[in-house]
Each structure stands twice: as structure tokens, then as C-alpha cells.
Amino acid sequence: MLDMGMSIPRCLAALAMVSSFVRADSPPDAEDAAYPAIERFVEVLETVRKRHPDVDRVAYDRLVNHALEGMLAGLDPFSSFIHPEMAARVEAEGGLDPELPSLGMSLGLRDDGVYVAAVPPHGAAADAGVLPGSLLLEIDGVVVEDGAVEDCLAMLRRPAGVVTKVKLKSPAEPQPVEVKLEHRLVQDRSVAESRMLDGDDAVGYLRLATFGGHSAREVEAALDDLEDAGMKRLVLDLRHNPGGDLEQTVRILGLFVPPSTAVVSTRGREGEQGDPLKTPERQRRKRDYPLVVLIDRMSASASELTAGALQDLKRATIIGETSYGKGSVQQIIPMGGGTALRLTIATYHTPSGRTPHRQGITPDVVVETDDAAREMADKSRRIDSLAPDERKAVEAWRDPVMDAARTSFEGN
């Protein structure tokens, strides 16, 4: 039981936390488990406050906020606790964008300084081993000032090919480490490439880099051009596509499946299901030609829902690697003290009811890909930025996933 010798405010806070555990929608054993858990939390909190030598770092707000940060981070990679410092800064700036797409990471602000808040799995930061929660100490030798998140964002927004050196205090290392990050090309357009395949005047190729705000319009325009050029079969490449706008996802699916087709639904904690999202009621062109969709282990979110829906509806053959496994819904929930939660509240599901969350989409045709092939595929996506000798090697390389796609069309 709780120690009644605690101060009244702390008892009330602990009891309030307990009451949140024992609501009707909590697990059956929550009431029995809550009191010992709260006792343990309060005991650790008070021990830290009494024994830690750095008095400036043991204020209640600071300790509890960092505890909440760890709790949210331990749930899944997409839930997070928004510190009051960052929440206030966002409100003051009218919407501060903390993302750095060319580096594949986002920044945040907490009481000990600017830190790496998120590291998606497909960017330069992830490839360099940067961990979420790392404190940002220096940028190209310039010391990061307390609270200077805007300055850091400005310094870290650079063109593709530029190398930035950052010094970080990683949660996994006792000493600061210096990391070199090369900025990567960020596609302004969602359709990164659209062409007829060499050697086959009936097969079109369309690579979708992201699901942005105008993706459906771009894809439809590209399909019109390919069809006018004589396309009878299509390869839709979603490899390395991290996802994006759900509405655009549904509209893109509407280009390939009948109008008013249910393609995506959500399910909450108790299995409650939202109204399914359906493709548009009207379709300008009927596109029923053979379709192959390429995915890899970096295809995430909207890419997975697109591949999964087309697979369930028997509309496409899916080729490549099992996808990343991000199929969850997040919501920003304001909390007390100027804080907020970015919390996963539901999962996305394809027409058959399955979810890609934590398991990905398994291709119909699995093509094993080694690191050398992945490196060549990555270079092929940015071939215009390569040196002449590298470009020549990439142009001579045969993509095994594309070979499998061509083979799947045989007889069609």
C-alpha cells in the first residue's frame, strides 16, 4: 500500500495515477497491480530526490516528465511524450516543423537541451546509428546553445550531398560521439520516376517516393502518359517509400480498383472498428491491366496499406521483401502542465482485416536481397548525383526484383 507518511500532494498525485489505471477499460488485474507499481515509482522518485548530488536536476516536474518520456518511448516507436518546453515553443512559433528529411530525423526540445526526437528507419541518421533521445551538443564544431532549436533546424537544412558533422550524447554511450551525416535528396514530387521499360514497349514503370499532398494527381497524370505511350502492364515501385497521406493512399488505390471499394479500416483497443475508407465514387479511366507492386523492408505505412489492399483484392502481384511493419494510428492528446502525448490509439487494416503493424506485408513473390543489392538499388534511386564510374556500374547492374517483376508478366 501507499506510504501514508508521504506528503499530501504526492499521495494525491499517486492516487490520481492509480485511478487512471483502474478504469473499466483497463486489464482485469490492473487494480491489484497498480498499487505496488505506484509505490515503486514514488519510492524511486523520492530516493532520487534525496540522494542525487545534482540538486538542480531533481525537481519533480523534471523527473516526472522524463519518466513519462521513457514510458511513452517504451510503448512503440511512434508514441512519444511532448515536453512543455517544446509544446510552448511550437505554440509560440505558430507551428514549428522539427523534421529534417534530408537527414532522416526530427529534433525536439527538453530541459537539458535540443535532442533527436525521432529517427525513421530509412534515412541518413538511421544508417549512421543515431538513436532517438540523443542530446545534440555541436553542429560542425559550433556548440548548440540551450533552447536554440530553431537555429539548429536552420543549420541542419542543407542540400543533398553536403556532409554535416554532429556531436551527440547518445543514450547508449557514456561519452559524446561525433557522427558524419550526408544529406540526401528529398523528392519534391511524389512520382520520382515514370517511363516505359527498355526492351518491352508494353510495360510501364512508375516509382512513387512518398504519399504527399498531390500524389494521386501526379500518379494519374503519369499513368495517362504511359497509357498513351502504349502501356499494357505496370510495375508500381514502392520500395523505400516511407508512406504519408492516407487520403492520397485511398485515392491512388481508386485508380486501380472499382469505385466505392472499401480499402482501409481502423481498429481500436477493444476491437472497435471505424467506418472503412472507400475509393472515390467515380473513376475517370478503367485501369484493369496487369499490375505488379514492388516493396522492400523500408516500405512503410501508406506503402504497406497500398500493397496489402491490392494483394487482398487480387488486383496485383506483390514482389520483393517483407515490408517494415508500420500500420498504426497516432493522436496528439493535450495533457496537464502544457504537455501532450503523441499516442498510438489504433491500427490500420486492409480489406481482409489484417494489419501490417509489427508484421509487415509478405510479398506473393519473395526476392531475397543482400546488402550489396540494397546499396545498388539505393544508388539507382539517385543515379543523377553519382560520379561517372559509379553511374556506369549501376546502369550495368541487373535488379533482381525488377527481373522477378518482368517474369511475373510472362503470359499476360
Image (cartoon, rainbow, N blue to C red):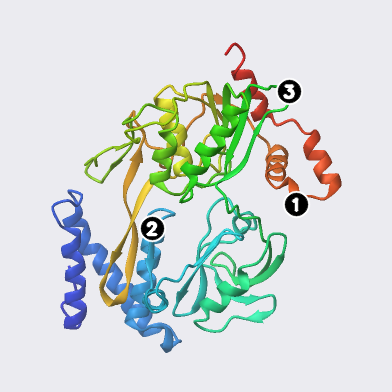
Q: Residues within 10 Å of mark 1 (few under 14, many from 20)?
A: some
The reply to whether residue 175 is visible in this rendering is no
Identified by mark 2, the residue type is Ser
Residue 170 percent location from the top left of the image: 57, 68
Q: Determine crowd level at label 3: few under 14, some 14-19, many 20+ residues with C-alpha closer than 10 A.
A: few
- Residue 68, how many percent across, how many down? 35, 67
Callout 3 amino acid: Gly
Counting from the top left corner in percent of width and height, residue 25 is at 17, 51
Secondary structure at numbered mark 2: loop
* Mark closest to the chain's N terminus, 3 or 1: 3
- Do labels 3 and 2 touch, CB within 8 Å? no
Residue beneath label 2, please? Answer: 79
Q: Residue at x 59, y 30 (%)?
A: 226
The disc at residue 385 is 1
Distance from Cα at disc 3 to Cα at disc 2: 47 Å
Quadrant where the N terminus lies?
Answer: bottom left
Name the image quarter holding the C terminus: top right
| Between discs 3 and 2, the one toward the N terminus | 2
Camera-side mark, 3 or 1: 3
**Foreground residue, 76 or 409?**
409
Q: Residue at x 33, y 74 (%)?
A: 64
Q: Is residue 218 left or right of residue 350?
A: right
Say which element carries label 3. Answer: loop
- In the figure, residue 103 lies in which quadrant? bottom right
* Up-down relation of residue 222 to residue 174 (above or below): above
The type of residue carrying mark 1 is Ser
Looking at the rendered structure, which numbered label has been put on residue 84? none
Which residue has dot 3 on it? 199
Question: Is 349 rendered above or below residue 119?
Answer: above
Query: In the picture provided, is 311 more to the left or to the right than 205?
Result: left
